[in-house]
Amino acid sequence: MKKLLILSLSVLFFACNMAPKVDYVVFSGKVENPSGDKVTISKGTQEFDFELAEDGTWSDTIKVESGYFRFDDTNESSEMYLEPGYNLYLTLNTEQFDETIKYEGAGSGPNNFLAAKYLLDESLDQGDEFYKMDEGAAQAYLDDIKAQMMDLMEKQQDLPSDFVEMEKRNISYSVEGKKIYYAYYHPKVTGEEYEASEEFMAEINGLDVNLDVDYELGSYRFLVGEYHENKMDEMASVSEKLEYIGTLQNPKVKSSLVGNFNYELIPGGEYNEAIVAAINEYSDNEKLKEIVAEKAAALDKLIAGNASPQFSYEDVEGNMVSLEDFKGQYVYLDVWATWCGPCRREIPYLKELEEEYSDRNIAFVGVSIDKNDDKQKWLDFVAEKELVGTQVFSDSDWSSEWVKAYAIYSIPRFILVDPDGNIVDAMAPRPSDKSGIKALLDEQSI
């Protein structure tokens, strides 16, 4: 009898171990006031679309490996963490996206923590006040952010231990990453010369950039990218930088770094062909390769002196405004959107520039590429921020023919057109680059 019992247990154990391993996630939810007809989950080159029913609900099963993903509702996004076996139900109201996002079911713990961590980080954000601090105060501020995030994690009981350990590193990397922005914006905000001290940047300078286990973390990828970007800053030409990328061993790092050269493509650029070739060779992002090919073709038509592509868009009063309406004036175009943080950061500098050149022969025109459904949001934003100059709303956001003609794949984007309607600079300096934009305007004797 005893032998039969042992045999039965052995068979049961074997049978359990032969059960199929779960390699999928069940993902469902409901969005109130959706921005579009679908929501998306993405990670690197992976992308899953979920079509919304009329009531904003969806339910589907996707095959994934463990890791961080981005949940996207067209206009806004949030970080997610998925593991095979999760069964998540998400609810949110897009009118208060970050404040209302909530998860239920298996895997809800890590995801509710990520949502709460973002809200905490947002509540602690002091904007330009942070960049005005001296290094000592900035370090104390960052230490406090890190401590509060760690405390938030310790108070949440339903987090797997391996996720906790990973998030500890993630938090540390993300807080250190804020120092990169501090070093960049501190001199711009204060007007003072500044170089970050070795003590302040010690952890960044001592970073091990070859940790494959942490390359899953966007905060770590950012720091690794900065490390290699700093190395490449010492190189004289784009071709040298592309050769450097070719010497790297990690294909994920190569793919990430070479993708950034998409932004090095310029009208008539001597390295355009080499950049396209390198992206085709090193990038694992097929969609990026398609975009780069289209962009390079469009940029060939945007050489200084060529006629500018034209638009006819509605202004805040509902009147149609075309680029030709400004014939006889230089036009400084600001392509932006209400949801774009870097665009909003340019507003104070743009206002300063407009005021300084208010009596010159130049018009300032803002072109919003917000979604059509967000037109009222755009109108409210223009009024609230007291944006000056002429403000117009593109006819179909990123898909506008004018936007595509100018090869605009990221914003903010600034463009200078001359009084004859010809291109001066299709990628003009931003207002925050005070010396760069003033030098360009001075060259035109504006």
Image (tube, rainbow, N blue to C red):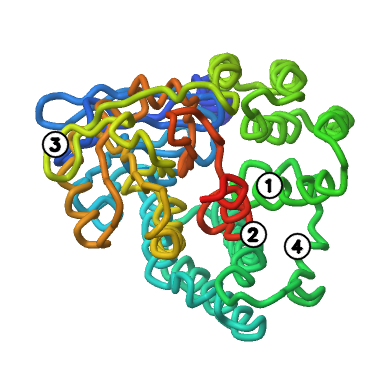
Residue at the image point whose x is 54% and y is 76% from the top = 147
Q: Which residue is mark 1?
A: 214
Task: Estimate the spatial distance between the alpha carbons at disc 3 and disc 2, rounded to whole Å.
Answer: 48 Å
Circle 2: residue type: Tyr
Q: Nearer the viewer, residue 198 or 11?
A: 198
- 335 vs 54: above or below: below
Which is more toward the observer, 176 or 359?
Answer: 359
Judge left or right: residue 108 versus residue 255.
left
**To which residue does mark 3 refer?**
319
Does residue 1 appear anywhere in the picture? no
Q: Which badge, 4 or 3, comes first in the chain's sequence? A: 4
Marks 4 and 3, how far apart at CA: 51 Å
Q: Which corner quadrant of the image does residue 7 belong to?
A: top right
Specify few, some or many for label 3: CA neighbours under 10 Å numbering under 14, 14-19, or 20 or more. few
Q: Indicate which disc, 1 or 3, sits on the residue closer to the N terminus.
A: 1
Dot 4 amino acid type: Ile
Q: Please tell me which of labels 1 and 2 falls first in the chain.
A: 2
The numbered mark at residue 173 is: 2
Indicate which disc residue 204 carries: 4
> Do the residues bearing badges 1 and 2 touch, measured as CB atoms within 8 Å?
yes
Residue 35 image offset from top left, x and y in percent: 22, 35
